[in-house]
Image (spheres, helix red, strand yellow):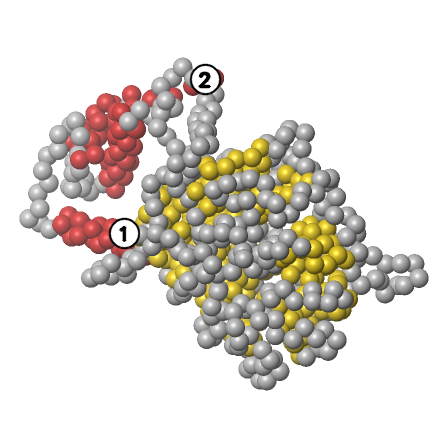
Amino acid sequence: MAPSTPLLTIRGSEGLYMVNGPPHFTESTVFPRESGKNCKAYTFSKDGTLFAWGNGEKINVISVTTKGLLHSFDLPKAVCLEFSPKNTVLATWQPYTTSKDDTAGIPNLQLYDLKTGTCLKSFIQKKMQNWCPSWSEDETLCARNVNNEVHFFENNNFNTIANKLHLKKINDFVLSPGPQPYKVAVYVPGSKAAPSFVRLYQYPNFDEPHAALANKSFFKADKVTMLWNKKATAVLVIASTDVDKTGASYYGEQTLHYIATNGESAVVQLPKNGPIYDVVWNSSSTEFCAVYGFMPAKATVFNLKCDPVFDFGTGPRNAAYYSPHGHILVLAGFGNLRGQMEVWDVKKYKLISKPVASDSTYFAWCPDGEHILTATCAPRLRVNNGYKIWHYTGSVLHKYDVPSNAELWQVSWQPFLDGIFPEKAITYQVVPSDVPSEEPKAATAYRPPALRNKPVTNSKLHEEEPPQNMKPQPGNEKPLSKTALKNQRKHEAKKAAKQEARSDKSPDTVPAPAPQSAPRNTVSQATSGDPETDRKIKNLKKKLKAIEQLKEQAAAGKQLEKNQLEKIQKEKALLQELEDLELGI
């Protein structure tokens, strides 16, 4: 029987060991600690019942439930391990090498039968990227990308290629999740004047005319990331270029595309320019969240029509993580950001908590949908290594700091199948904890020496945008986009200007004399008949308006420049000059 709470596996310079999950956090007896620094890889099966690791000599496989050793394979150089979805096959990969006698190279990708312990098949897989074959969830289908073709094997028979998908220069593919019918998304990079494209196919219909379920072509793509939703009805494609030719971004350019299996496709319109940091599907398969734009970044939830549903405003964030049940969303700023997390109830779009996990390099939801793991791991950061277990309400339930002379390399939860842990009602009350809270030090803004003895102004480098519900309310029209609102304002301004011009031409309109103390309202509608005088009057009014704006800024506490103060001192002379010109009309 599976444990009631997921285990934590920790790999570092202190060795490889397991810790019981919340609420105990004691070292587990499922796996005896292996000391030493030789462990290069470990993995759980998809249901969490099997565990495999390499100790520098062998790859061992144990049953988590019985704690017994099942198999041991003599693979001292293996650095990647993966179980098939139903625990039938163990895939291992080691760096590709060639011998002096054999120019073809030595097969470095092995597939082992976990029932008999025999090697089913060995392949040559030179690159570590996308090394592992892709299985369907029922293991009926398995696919590999080989020399610009996708090879399909059925029922784990790797001696016979059951089908091939051949397109010129296939760079990548992703097999759909879920049951039959199986679908596959393939990416072909562009060449010369031809665009890149992503196509969706249904297995095994590859060769028929118009066999593709959907097709989306685009320029500006050196690489793509393809993300299927859980129901396999749509794919999100993040197309990236390595270099932004406009020079606007160090990260190159990114665009987000939506492709559905019914043939529909669209470019997802992101209101803010800048990089796309993260895109993630909700487990419901009906919504996705994108984090994008120059810092402070925006985060927006979109529906399947690519219309915005909720805008979380701007903030220091570069990642998004839905909980396993899809009812909670965490927006976080890790890496070169300070680790601020925003935990949102996505049913009510209400903020639950806002904890800070400083220096974090790793984040993972616990399969129970209540707890969160954050960690600081080497080699990304070699100081202050350790991990924390949080409740989503913001309290730290467990904390472990690695000694200063040691490093933490990897930490992860034991996976569980969907439905093992039921969804629980969201609570906004902070869960009590015995771990003392660490209040992050409030960072004060740098002030140059010349300004340190002067009053602090409230000016901000960036204006933060608040969260906004983008769903059309009952009885209301669909909310306008930023561009539509801008055009609407322009239209209204033109309309107002025309009405003002008509009122100027009306003979019944007599301009009221304006007081001298309000230069912005000192508007005389009469003209002198001399274009030169009229031009001087117009310029004087423009200068007086600018002076009035400077006075307002000074009253608000803004520090004015020397030339701006000199402009204000000229106000009296300008008013006198304006009065003389108008009296001469």
- In which quadrant is the N terminus drawn? bottom right
Q: Where is residue 75 in the image (x, y as percent from the top left)?
A: 78, 55
The residue identified by callout 1 is 489
- In which quadrant is the C terminus drawn? top left
Q: In which quarter of the image is residue 211?
A: bottom right
Considering only vertical position in the picture, is 387 above or below 320? above
Q: How crowded is mark 1: few (under 14 residues within 10 Å), some or many (20 or more)?
A: few
Q: Position of residue 449 (x, y in %)?
A: 47, 17
Residue 299 shows in this picture:
yes
Q: In which quarter of the image is residue 10?
A: top right
Q: Earlier in the sequence, mark 1 or mark 2?
A: 2
In the image, 247: left or right of 156? left
Q: Residue 450 carries which label?
A: 2
Q: What residue type is disc 1 on?
A: Arg
Q: Position of residue 117 (x, y in %)?
A: 74, 64
- Most extreme residue toward the top is 453
- Most extreme residue toward the left is 508
Residue drawn at (17%, 34%) of the image: 522
In the image, 291: left or right of 37? left
Question: What is the CA distance from the residue labelled 1 to the residue labelled 2?
Answer: 41 Å
Residue drawn at (71%, 77%) of the image: 161
Residue drawn at (33%, 41%) of the image: 429
Label 1 vs label 2, nearer the camera: 2
Q: What residue type is disc 2 on?
A: Ala
Q: Residue 528 carries which label?
A: none
Q: In which quarter of the image is residue 93?
A: bottom right
Q: Which of 4/492 is in front?
A: 4
Considering only vertical position in the picture, is 437 above or below 81? above
